[in-house]
Image (cartoon, rainbow, N blue to C red):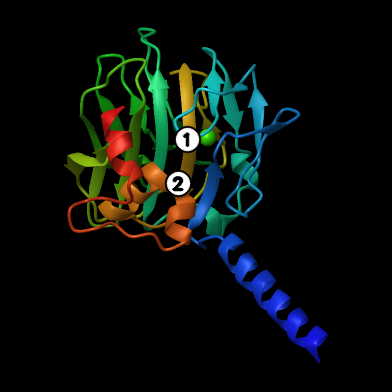
Amino acid sequence: MKIIVSLSILLCFLISGLSIAISDPDLIVYFPYEEMSGNIILDQSGNGHNGDVKGKIKIVDNGKRGKAAEFQQGDYIDMNGPDFAADQIPKNEITICAWVNCKKTGDHHEIFNARAADQTWVIHPEIRSEGAFRWLLRTDGGNTIFDFTAGVVEWEKWMHYAGVYDGKKSTLYINGESVGEGNGGAKIAKDWGLGARVGRTIDDARPFTGLMDDFNLWKRALTKDEILIIMTKGPEGIIKGESVSPNGNVASTWGDLKSH
Ligand SMILES: [Ca+2]
């Protein structure tokens, strides 16, 4: 009898342990950049969207949360856009987040880019050479839903980019604060038929150069509080149900983060 009870307790532990590992169904891609497998960047979203490294991306120790990916000019991660499942491509809502630490190369830095089969340039989350951040989405047929630049880039410093679109309006958060808003009212282009990449445009322009940590892509609009949680705890923080206190603290580590 004792053995059965012990086994039951053990089973409960295993099940509750597993429930933490189950990811959010709206989290599409998550690269914590803690390790590579050969030339593959491992997706921790649970969806298996591992990326193929093109170039010489290295995993380095001086990340924002643990390790990070170091991009030399021209390096990128191929996300195999043409084979991306239709229900995994954000169309109604989207959030794209990353910690970025860019070198001032004189060029723009593309965090992520996708191009649709109809040649629409779908998305531009960018660090611009002139020292601002850009956020853009387009519809099928290439109509621009919104396109704005906002915020101030500090080169070779960790900054958190979070582009959000809820279908009605778009918001760009830098380091957890809203710096700009744009229009809504349209669906995002439905496919990535000509490609999807982290770190370079599909036509080999705007090479992301520097460090990137915690790249994560969602098919829903996250709230400001959720972005604050991601900044300190990663997507795991949302999956585990972490919350933000009324004074904006996620946890005791938040003060440490701000002081960096
Ligand atoms: Ca990391």
Q: Is residue 143 visible?
A: no
Q: Are marks 1 and 2 in contact (CB under 8 Å)?
A: yes
Give the side of residue 157 with respect to residue 198, left or right.
left
Residue 151, above or below 193: above
Pointer 2 residue Cβ closer than 8 Å to ligand 1: yes
Q: Position of residue 224 (x, y in %)?
A: 26, 51
Pick whichever, 250 or 238, lies toward us: 250
Q: Nearer the viewer, residue 145 or 127?
A: 127
Residue 198 spot, x, y in % from top left: 52, 31
Disc 2 residue crowd, few under 14, some 14–19, many 20+, Cα 10 Å: many
Amino acid type indicated by mark 2:
Gly
- Mark 2, residue position: 234
Q: Where is the N terminus found, in terms of image quarters?
A: bottom right
At 75% from the left edge and 81% from the top edge, which residue is drawn? 6
For the view shown, which residue lies furthest in the bottom direction? 1
Work out whether residue 157 or residue 173 is closer to the camera in this orientation and state it.
157
First in sequence, mark 1 or 2: give its number: 1
As measured in the structure, the alpha-carbon distance from the residue carrying label 1 to the one carrying label 2 is 8 Å
Q: Residue at position x 68%, y 32% from top?
A: 36
Q: Position of residue 32 (x, y in %)?
A: 54, 39
* Whether residue 135 is situated above or below residue 241 in the rendered picture: above
Q: In terms of depth relative to the viewer, which is nearer, 252 or 117?
A: 252
The answer as to whether callout 1 falls within 8 Å of ligand 1 is yes
Residue 138 to residue 206: above or below: below
Q: Which residue is mark 1?
A: 65
| SS assignment at label 1 | loop
Left or right side of 120 for 79: right
Residue drawn at point x = 21 percent, y = 41 percent:
177
Mark 1 crowd level (few <14, some 14–19, many ≥20, 10 Å Cα)? some
Residue 66 in picture, x, y percent from top left: 52, 33
